[in-house]
Amino acid sequence: MSLRIAEIFGPTIQGEGALIGQPTVFVRAGGCDYRCSWCDSMHAVDSRYRQDWAVMDAAGIMAEVARLSGGQPLVVSISGGNPAIQDFGPVIALGRGQGYRFACETQGSVARDWFADLALLVLSPKPPSSGQETDWAVFDACLAAAGKAERIMKIVVFDQNDLDWARATSVRYPDLPLYLQPGNPETDPEKPVDPQALADRMLWLVEATVGRGWLVPRILPQLHVLIWGNRRGV
Ligand SMILES: C[S@@+](CC[C@H](N)C(=O)[O-])C[C@H]1O[C@@H](n2cnc3c(N)ncnc32)[C@H](O)[C@@H]1O
Ligand SMILES: Nc1nc2[nH]cc(C(=O)O)c2c(=O)[nH]1
Ligand code: SF4
Ligand SMILES: [Mg+2]
């Protein structure tokens, strides 16, 4: 069983969400069923980059993870693209046998049995600014497929319309821990990011939530973007 892999990198720190700051190796799957207008990982989405993706089996993927981590059992973060369009079950089974734990980032558009073998499922439904629509029946199937695995929801917010959408979504899923992260409008890996502009977006988001009495979500920046900008492989 082979998988399309855009990149494997690390160890680095998880820059987003519930595991922020935690050492991790990333396995970035190639291919996505969405086309978010502001996607920061188009090199793992657009088929223009397909020739740069490696075709690997579970043993090859875990060998590379072990090489990068020096064999130390850490959390492996599976992202993409949408990793759920491929079968990561064998990778997770092999890695768990070697002492690794797995987190997965997906938009919730495809449900998979192997979600139940994760330590953490990060569901990141897309707000209006992305130009994508969520199929909530499939999203619910993703939640159910995760079984007893920890689950969180992480929503990117660019503007007030996104924030209103995030709030309505949170009302729909009151038991799902909610993380908000400000959108990064500069997604070209060749271009520098302006840390002050990101801080300004963070400030706006904090004021627009906590500042207005909405005390439910946790609000975090993309830590890796603050440190490394849009560089790939970090
Ligand atoms: C590149 S996606 C890959 C996983 C999956 N396709 C998804 O969207 O959840 C990883 C995370 O990065 C977020 N993201 C993508 N582009 C972003 C941007 N320009 N600013 C902030 N977050 C972004 C996504 O919303 C998602 O939470
Ligand atoms: N350090 C780091 N943290 C991340 N958290 C989510 C990422 C992603 O692209 O899925 C990401 C990434 O690419 N790098
Ligand atoms: S779903 Fe994720 S990987 Fe796919 S286009 Fe959107 S942000 Fe990019
Ligand atoms: Mg990213």
Image (cartoon, grey):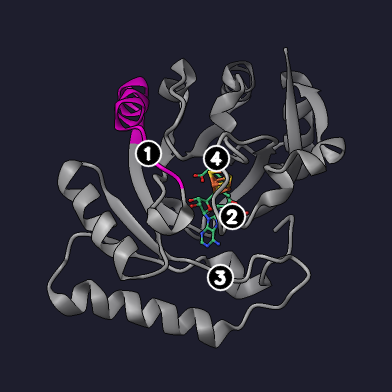
Q: Which residue is drawn at 35% across and 61% down?
A: 180
What residue does disc 2 label?
A: 39
Residue at which label 1 appears: 134
- State yes or no: Cβ of the residue under disc 4 lies below 8 Å from any atom of ligand 3: yes
Image spot of residue 158 (x, y percent)? 42, 67
Look at mark 4 in the image and give the residue it sits on. 34
Q: Dot 3 surroundings within 10 Å: few (below 14), some, or many (20 or more)? A: some
Asked if the stretch drawn in magenta spans residue 137, the answer is yes
Q: Earlier in the sequence, mark 1 or mark 4?
A: 4
Tags 4 and 2 touching, CB below 8 Å: yes
Specify whether 228 is left or right of 183. Answer: right
Q: How far separated are the C-alphas under marks 1 and 4? A: 10 Å
Q: Residue at x 83, y 32 (%)?
A: 54
Which numbered disc flags the more N-terminal residue, 3 or 2? 2
Q: Secondary structure beneath disc 1? A: loop
Residue 141 showing in the rendered view: yes
Q: Do the residues labelled 3 and 4 touch (CB within 8 Å)?
A: no
The answer to which of marks 2 and 1 sits earlier in the sequence is: 2
Identify residue type, mark 4. Tyr
Where is mark 3, residue-wise?
185
Q: Which amino acid does label 3 sit on?
A: Pro
Q: What residue type is labelled 2?
A: Cys
